[in-house]
Amino acid sequence: MAPEVQIARRGRPLGSPFSQWLNFRLVPFLAAHLVKLLAFTLRVQRVDEGPVEALVRSDQRFILAFWHRRLLMMPLAYPFRRKAGDGTARGVAILSSDSKDGERSAATWRWFGIHAVRGTAGHSGAQALVKMIQAVKQGWDLGITVDGPRGPRQQAKPGVLAVSRKTGAWIVPVCVAYETAWALRTWDALLIPRPFSRVVVRYGAPFRVAPEDREAVHLAELEGCLNGLETWAEGVARG
Protein backbone atom coordinates (compact mmCIF):
# COMPACT_ATOMS: atom_id res chain seq x y z
CA MET A 1 0.00 0.00 0.00
CA ALA A 2 1.32 3.45 -0.92
CA PRO A 3 2.13 5.75 2.00
CA GLU A 4 -0.47 8.38 2.83
CA VAL A 5 0.04 11.71 1.13
CA GLN A 6 0.94 14.30 3.71
CA ILE A 7 -1.80 16.90 4.02
CA ALA A 8 -0.81 20.16 5.70
CA ARG A 9 -3.03 21.11 8.63
CA ARG A 10 -0.75 23.36 10.64
CA GLY A 11 2.37 25.41 10.16
CA ARG A 12 5.80 23.82 10.09
CA PRO A 13 8.32 24.74 12.83
CA LEU A 14 10.09 27.48 10.88
CA GLY A 15 11.65 30.32 12.85
CA SER A 16 10.95 31.45 16.41
CA PRO A 17 7.60 30.72 18.08
CA PHE A 18 6.50 34.31 17.46
CA SER A 19 7.58 34.14 13.82
CA GLN A 20 5.67 30.90 13.40
CA TRP A 21 2.54 32.38 14.93
CA LEU A 22 2.81 35.54 12.83
CA ASN A 23 3.67 33.99 9.47
CA PHE A 24 1.83 30.68 9.60
CA ARG A 25 -1.15 31.51 11.83
CA LEU A 26 -2.03 35.19 11.93
CA VAL A 27 -1.12 36.25 8.39
CA PRO A 28 -2.90 33.28 6.72
CA PHE A 29 -5.93 33.80 8.97
CA LEU A 30 -6.20 37.48 8.08
CA ALA A 31 -5.52 36.93 4.37
CA ALA A 32 -8.06 34.10 4.10
CA HIS A 33 -10.79 35.98 5.91
CA LEU A 34 -10.24 39.12 3.86
CA VAL A 35 -10.66 37.04 0.71
CA LYS A 36 -13.75 35.36 2.19
CA LEU A 37 -15.22 38.76 3.06
CA LEU A 38 -14.58 39.95 -0.48
CA ALA A 39 -16.10 36.76 -1.92
CA PHE A 40 -19.22 37.29 0.20
CA THR A 41 -19.90 40.55 -1.66
CA LEU A 42 -19.60 39.00 -5.13
CA ARG A 43 -22.50 37.99 -7.36
CA VAL A 44 -21.44 34.53 -8.56
CA GLN A 45 -22.74 32.65 -11.58
CA ARG A 46 -21.54 29.28 -12.93
CA VAL A 47 -21.93 28.24 -16.57
CA ASP A 48 -21.25 24.98 -18.43
CA GLU A 49 -20.94 23.14 -15.12
CA GLY A 50 -23.07 20.15 -16.19
CA PRO A 51 -20.21 17.85 -17.31
CA VAL A 52 -18.27 18.53 -14.09
CA GLU A 53 -21.31 17.78 -11.96
CA ALA A 54 -21.69 14.53 -13.90
CA LEU A 55 -18.12 13.56 -12.96
CA VAL A 56 -18.95 14.20 -9.31
CA ARG A 57 -22.14 12.11 -9.50
CA SER A 58 -20.25 9.22 -11.11
CA ASP A 59 -17.46 9.49 -8.50
CA GLN A 60 -14.72 10.22 -11.02
CA ARG A 61 -11.71 12.34 -10.09
CA PHE A 62 -10.77 15.47 -12.00
CA ILE A 63 -8.16 18.21 -12.17
CA LEU A 64 -9.18 21.85 -12.41
CA ALA A 65 -6.66 23.47 -14.77
CA PHE A 66 -6.41 27.26 -14.90
CA TRP A 67 -4.08 30.21 -15.42
CA HIS A 68 -2.30 31.55 -12.35
CA ARG A 69 -3.76 35.05 -12.68
CA ARG A 70 -7.24 33.63 -11.94
CA LEU A 71 -6.11 31.87 -8.75
CA LEU A 72 -7.52 34.14 -6.02
CA MET A 73 -11.22 33.29 -6.42
CA MET A 74 -10.74 29.80 -7.83
CA PRO A 75 -12.34 28.24 -4.69
CA LEU A 76 -15.62 29.44 -6.22
CA ALA A 77 -15.08 26.85 -8.97
CA TYR A 78 -15.17 23.96 -6.50
CA PRO A 79 -18.50 23.94 -4.59
CA PHE A 80 -18.49 20.13 -4.33
CA ARG A 81 -18.52 17.81 -1.30
CA ARG A 82 -16.85 14.48 -1.97
CA LYS A 83 -15.74 11.29 -0.21
CA ALA A 84 -13.13 8.63 -0.85
CA GLY A 85 -14.04 4.98 -1.34
CA ASP A 86 -13.82 4.30 2.40
CA GLY A 87 -16.22 7.14 3.20
CA THR A 88 -13.65 9.65 4.46
CA ALA A 89 -14.12 13.26 3.39
CA ARG A 90 -12.24 14.38 0.30
CA GLY A 91 -12.15 17.57 -1.73
CA VAL A 92 -9.63 19.49 -3.78
CA ALA A 93 -5.90 19.53 -3.10
CA ILE A 94 -3.03 21.65 -4.37
CA LEU A 95 0.70 21.03 -4.38
CA SER A 96 2.59 23.20 -1.91
CA SER A 97 6.34 23.24 -1.45
CA ASP A 98 8.16 22.75 1.86
CA SER A 99 9.47 26.32 1.73
CA LYS A 100 8.27 29.12 4.00
CA ASP A 101 6.22 30.59 1.16
CA GLY A 102 4.71 27.18 0.53
CA GLU A 103 3.84 26.77 4.19
CA ARG A 104 2.22 30.19 4.32
CA SER A 105 0.21 29.40 1.21
CA ALA A 106 -0.89 26.03 2.60
CA ALA A 107 -1.99 27.60 5.87
CA THR A 108 -4.03 30.19 3.97
CA TRP A 109 -5.82 27.78 1.64
CA ARG A 110 -6.67 25.52 4.59
CA TRP A 111 -9.25 28.10 5.65
CA PHE A 112 -11.09 27.40 2.39
CA GLY A 113 -11.10 23.64 2.91
CA ILE A 114 -8.39 23.28 0.27
CA HIS A 115 -5.68 20.85 1.30
CA ALA A 116 -2.01 21.09 0.48
CA VAL A 117 -0.08 18.05 -0.66
CA ARG A 118 3.41 18.67 0.64
CA GLY A 119 6.32 18.13 -1.68
CA THR A 120 9.08 19.86 -3.60
CA ALA A 121 9.45 19.91 -7.34
CA GLY A 122 12.79 18.10 -7.30
CA HIS A 123 14.61 17.13 -10.48
CA SER A 124 12.37 17.79 -13.51
CA GLY A 125 9.35 18.05 -11.23
CA ALA A 126 9.39 14.29 -10.58
CA GLN A 127 8.71 14.51 -6.84
CA ALA A 128 5.80 16.90 -7.34
CA LEU A 129 4.34 14.61 -9.99
CA VAL A 130 4.51 11.57 -7.69
CA LYS A 131 2.79 13.48 -4.88
CA MET A 132 -0.06 14.60 -7.13
CA ILE A 133 -0.56 11.12 -8.57
CA GLN A 134 -0.74 9.66 -5.06
CA ALA A 135 -3.28 12.29 -4.02
CA VAL A 136 -5.63 11.48 -6.93
CA LYS A 137 -5.36 7.75 -6.24
CA GLN A 138 -6.34 8.43 -2.61
CA GLY A 139 -9.52 10.19 -3.68
CA TRP A 140 -8.58 13.85 -4.02
CA ASP A 141 -9.39 16.15 -6.91
CA LEU A 142 -6.62 18.58 -7.82
CA GLY A 143 -6.32 22.25 -8.69
CA ILE A 144 -3.32 23.07 -10.87
CA THR A 145 -2.10 26.42 -12.20
CA VAL A 146 -0.74 25.13 -15.47
CA ASP A 147 1.51 28.15 -16.03
CA GLY A 148 2.63 28.42 -12.40
CA PRO A 149 4.17 28.99 -10.05
CA ARG A 150 6.49 31.40 -11.89
CA GLY A 151 5.40 31.38 -15.52
CA PRO A 152 5.90 32.20 -18.31
CA ARG A 153 2.39 33.63 -18.19
CA GLN A 154 -0.27 31.68 -20.07
CA GLN A 155 2.11 29.00 -21.30
CA ALA A 156 0.91 25.54 -20.32
CA LYS A 157 3.30 23.07 -18.69
CA PRO A 158 2.85 19.31 -19.18
CA GLY A 159 2.61 18.17 -15.54
CA VAL A 160 -1.19 18.16 -15.53
CA LEU A 161 -1.20 15.84 -18.55
CA ALA A 162 1.13 13.39 -16.83
CA VAL A 163 -1.16 13.20 -13.79
CA SER A 164 -4.16 12.47 -16.02
CA ARG A 165 -2.22 9.83 -17.96
CA LYS A 166 -1.11 8.01 -14.80
CA THR A 167 -4.42 8.21 -12.88
CA GLY A 168 -7.21 8.46 -15.44
CA ALA A 169 -8.38 11.72 -13.87
CA TRP A 170 -10.24 14.12 -16.13
CA ILE A 171 -8.75 17.53 -16.89
CA VAL A 172 -11.27 20.36 -16.63
CA PRO A 173 -10.17 23.76 -17.96
CA VAL A 174 -11.78 26.53 -15.90
CA CYS A 175 -11.77 30.31 -15.72
CA VAL A 176 -13.16 32.77 -13.18
CA ALA A 177 -14.13 36.03 -14.88
CA TYR A 178 -14.63 39.34 -13.06
CA GLU A 179 -16.85 42.16 -14.23
CA THR A 180 -14.49 44.62 -12.53
CA ALA A 181 -11.08 43.87 -11.03
CA TRP A 182 -7.67 45.21 -10.09
CA ALA A 183 -4.60 43.77 -11.84
CA LEU A 184 -1.45 43.55 -9.72
CA ARG A 185 2.03 44.25 -11.07
CA THR A 186 3.12 40.64 -10.71
CA TRP A 187 4.51 38.24 -13.32
CA ASP A 188 1.00 36.90 -13.93
CA ALA A 189 -0.92 40.21 -13.57
CA LEU A 190 -2.91 38.58 -10.74
CA LEU A 191 -6.53 39.74 -10.72
CA ILE A 192 -8.45 40.81 -7.61
CA PRO A 193 -12.18 41.39 -8.13
CA ARG A 194 -13.63 44.63 -6.87
CA PRO A 195 -16.23 44.33 -4.11
CA PHE A 196 -19.78 43.67 -5.33
CA SER A 197 -18.55 42.71 -8.80
CA ARG A 198 -20.33 40.11 -10.90
CA VAL A 199 -18.23 36.92 -11.17
CA VAL A 200 -18.76 34.17 -13.72
CA VAL A 201 -17.16 30.72 -13.39
CA ARG A 202 -16.98 28.91 -16.72
CA TYR A 203 -15.84 25.31 -17.26
CA GLY A 204 -14.34 23.89 -20.44
CA ALA A 205 -15.07 20.40 -21.75
CA PRO A 206 -13.42 17.67 -19.61
CA PHE A 207 -10.89 15.37 -21.31
CA ARG A 208 -8.49 12.60 -20.34
CA VAL A 209 -5.02 11.66 -21.55
CA ALA A 210 -4.62 8.02 -22.60
CA PRO A 211 -1.21 6.30 -22.42
CA GLU A 212 -0.90 6.26 -26.21
CA ASP A 213 -1.93 9.91 -26.72
CA ARG A 214 0.53 12.50 -27.99
CA GLU A 215 1.25 14.89 -25.14
CA ALA A 216 2.12 17.82 -27.41
CA VAL A 217 -1.33 17.72 -29.03
CA HIS A 218 -3.16 17.77 -25.71
CA LEU A 219 -0.90 20.51 -24.34
CA ALA A 220 -1.62 22.74 -27.34
CA GLU A 221 -5.35 22.04 -27.02
CA LEU A 222 -5.33 22.84 -23.29
CA GLU A 223 -3.42 26.05 -23.80
CA GLY A 224 -5.75 27.06 -26.62
CA CYS A 225 -8.82 26.31 -24.49
CA LEU A 226 -7.54 28.31 -21.53
CA ASN A 227 -6.57 31.23 -23.73
CA GLY A 228 -10.02 31.08 -25.29
CA LEU A 229 -11.53 31.24 -21.83
CA GLU A 230 -9.23 34.16 -21.04
CA THR A 231 -10.51 36.04 -24.09
CA TRP A 232 -14.07 35.30 -22.98
CA ALA A 233 -13.26 36.56 -19.44
CA GLU A 234 -11.89 39.82 -20.85
CA GLY A 235 -15.20 40.21 -22.66
CA VAL A 236 -17.03 39.82 -19.36
CA ALA A 237 -14.86 42.59 -17.94
CA ARG A 238 -15.73 44.85 -20.87
CA GLY A 239 -19.41 44.19 -20.34
Image: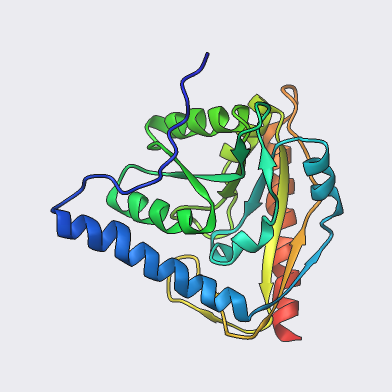
Question: Could you tell me residue 126's position as x and y percent?
Answer: 45, 29
Query: Between 71 and 84, which is closer to the camera in this rendering?
Result: 84
Q: Residue furthest top?
A: 1
Q: Residue at x 57, y 29 (%)?
A: 133
Residue 50, how many percent across, how many down? 86, 53
Q: Position of residue 216 (x, y in %)?
A: 68, 37
Give left or right: position of 119 versus 72.
left
Which image quarter: residue 160? top right
Above or below for 215 versus 33: above
Q: Is residue 191 visible?
A: no
Decide: is 212 above or below 26: above
Of all residues shown, which one is farthest toward the front? 87
Q: Quadrant of the C terminus?
A: bottom right
Quarter of the image for residue 227 reads bottom right
Instruction: Give me the residue at 53% from left, 76% from top.
Output: 37
**Residue lying at 63% horizontally and 84% vertically, measured from the top left:** 180
**In this rendering, position of residue 151 left or right of residue 90:** left
Q: Is residue 216 visible?
A: yes
Look at 74% across and 78% down and name the residue there.
Answer: 236
Q: Nearer the viewer, residue 95 or 57?
A: 57
* Numbered marks: total: 0
Please state which of residues 196 and 159 is positioned toward the viewer in this rendering: 196
Vertically, is 179 above or below 129?
Answer: below
Instruction: Tell me which corner region of the image, top left, top right, bottom left or bottom right, holds residue 29.
Output: bottom left
Task: Please provide percent x and percent y for residue 127.
Answer: 43, 30
The way the protein has been coloured in the rendering is rainbow
Q: Is residue 122 left or right of residue 237?
A: left
